[in-house]
Image (tube, grey):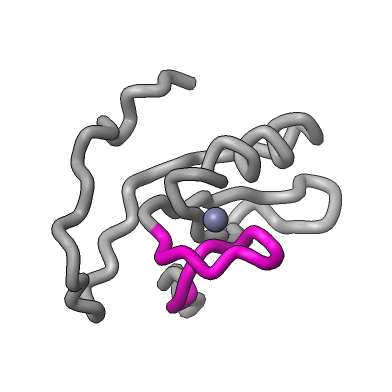
Amino acid sequence: MGLSSAAPQGGCSRAGCREPATWRIDWRNPKIHAEDRVKTWLACDEHVEYLREFLASRSFPVRVEAFEATDAAPEAPLRRDAVPGGEGA
Ligand SMILES: [Zn+2]
């Protein structure tokens, strides 16, 4: 298992969005990806639901988790009113 599962650095994966990511979306396309090949997108609060639905609508396995940007020191306190893992399956 030499593949790194590290999330990409930067912000939201939504095209044109430059917000810092607060969520990571791990997903896989069963048609072209092997069982252990997982792609990771990052998303801001506004687009996490859009991206998750985008993948879920294609019947891709999707997992959403809170993303901690440990390398960046945010200037403003992070909003913590969203509950990670509280959305169900
Ligand atoms: Zn975004």
Question: Residue at left 26%, top 31%?
Answer: 83
> Can you see residue 1?
no
Question: Residue at left 26%, top 61%?
Answer: 68
**Picture layout, residue 59 above or below residue 11:** above
Quadrant in which residue 40 is drawn? bottom right
Residues 66 and 63: in front is 66
**Is 20 covered by the magenta stretch?**
yes
Question: Residue at left 64%, top 39%?
Answer: 50
The magenta region covers 8-21
Question: Residue at left 46%, top 53%?
Answer: 44
Q: Position of residue 6 (x, y in %)?
A: 41, 72
Q: In the displayed image of the protein, which residue is found farthest to the front?
A: 76
Q: Is residue 49 left or right of residue 65?
A: right
Q: Does the magenta stretch mainly form a helix, a strand or a loop?
A: loop
Q: Position of residue 19 (x, y in %)?
A: 47, 64
**Is 24 covered by the magenta stretch?**
no
Q: In the displayed image of the protein, which residue is found farthest to the top?
A: 88
Q: In the displayed image of the protein, which residue is found farthest to the right?
A: 31
